Amino acid sequence: MKITKILTYTVLTLLAAIFIVPFIWLIVESFSPVSDLGFVIPSHFTLAPFYKVLTNHEFINSIYEGLIQSFGGTLISVMFSIGPAYIFSRKKFKLRLYLLLSILFLTGFPVFSLLIPEYIFYIKISLYNTLIGDILFLGVLNVPIDIWILKNSFDQIPQSIERAAFMDGASSIKSLFYVFLPLALPIVSVLIILNFVVNWGNFYVPFILLSSNHLLPIAVEIYSFFGTFNVRYNELAAFSIIYTIPAIILYMFSQKYMIKALSGGIKG
């Protein structure tokens, strides 16, 4: 028993080290005056990499574009998922099961395989290299999984609460906005975080659907640190740390809702 416990803790420690060491390198390298590929402790630390990144107009613009595209895609995903999730949860209609199974299939479908046909389609309808086109595609990507998650959350709300709302004169729309959404707020908050993180880190969609440098988000702009003959590792590390800040801030503000969602999802 003791040997088993020692082996378990040893394996867990090794796994933790595998994940922690790259973060330690990232922090150390971001304050390094020179660009080092390996894990090297610099002779002194400096803020120069952060200064170079934060004074670069293209990089700052990419953060701004990334925020707009990520929040825009998130807003579309969540907004267009609420109605279908409520209908699938509370309404009985023909082909309901087949539609649900289709949505479940789409959650695992490799949507990125559609990027090339979407690229051609966007050119034909003049949405290629436009901010709205990129946001629309990012929003559509997460709709199936959002519908499925919200539908399962709405299923947990007791029928008695909905009937009480109907007896007070509420319509289905009022019931959705004044009963279901407030009760499912923890789940909605988690969806917002997940959608934002997915969109924030999405490289392929903006890389294929956008061509103008001033529209490229941070996920694509970070690729510019890899030059033809060298890589600016210290600036790349500094930019990577800045890259993680929005997701961390969003998590901090939504932490209590995430805890509620993971511990039960529905209150009341």
Image (spheres, rainbow, N blue to C red):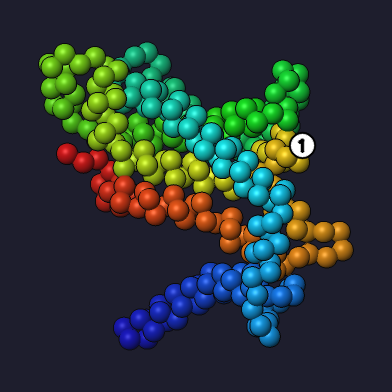
Q: Is residue 14 left or right of residue 42?
A: left
Q: Residue furthest right?
A: 229
Label count reads: 1
Secondary structure of residue under mark 1: loop
Residue 265: image location, x then y, percent: 28, 43
**Res 215 quadrant in image:** top right
Q: Is residue 33 left or right of residue 156?
A: right
Identify which residue is drawn at 73% across, 27% down: 128
Q: Is residue 128 above or below residue 61?
A: above
**Res 120 quadrant in image:** top right
Q: Is residue 7 left or right of residue 44?
A: left
Q: Quadrant of the C terminus?
A: top left
Identify which residue is drawn at 86% across, 59% down: 228
Residue 17: image location, x then y, percent: 52, 76
**Res 191 quadrant in image:** top left
Q: Is residue 119 above or below residue 42?
A: above
Q: Which residue is mark 1?
A: 212
Q: Quadrant of the N terminus?
A: bottom left
Q: Is residue 255 left or right of residue 144?
A: left
- What amino acid is labelled 1 in the image? Ser
Q: Nearer the viewer, residue 99 or 175?
A: 175
Identify which residue is drawn at 67% across, 63% down: 51
Residue 76: image location, x then y, percent: 50, 29
Residue 107 seen anywhere in this rendered image of the structure: no
Residue 73: image location, x then y, percent: 54, 34
Identify which residue is drawn at 64% across, 70% down: 47
Q: Nearer the viewer, residue 55 or 144?
A: 55
Residue 216 seen anywhere in this rendered image of the structure: yes
Mark 1 neighbour class, 10 Å CA radius: few under 14, some 14 to 19, many 20 or more: few
Q: Is residue 232 above or below residue 89?
A: below
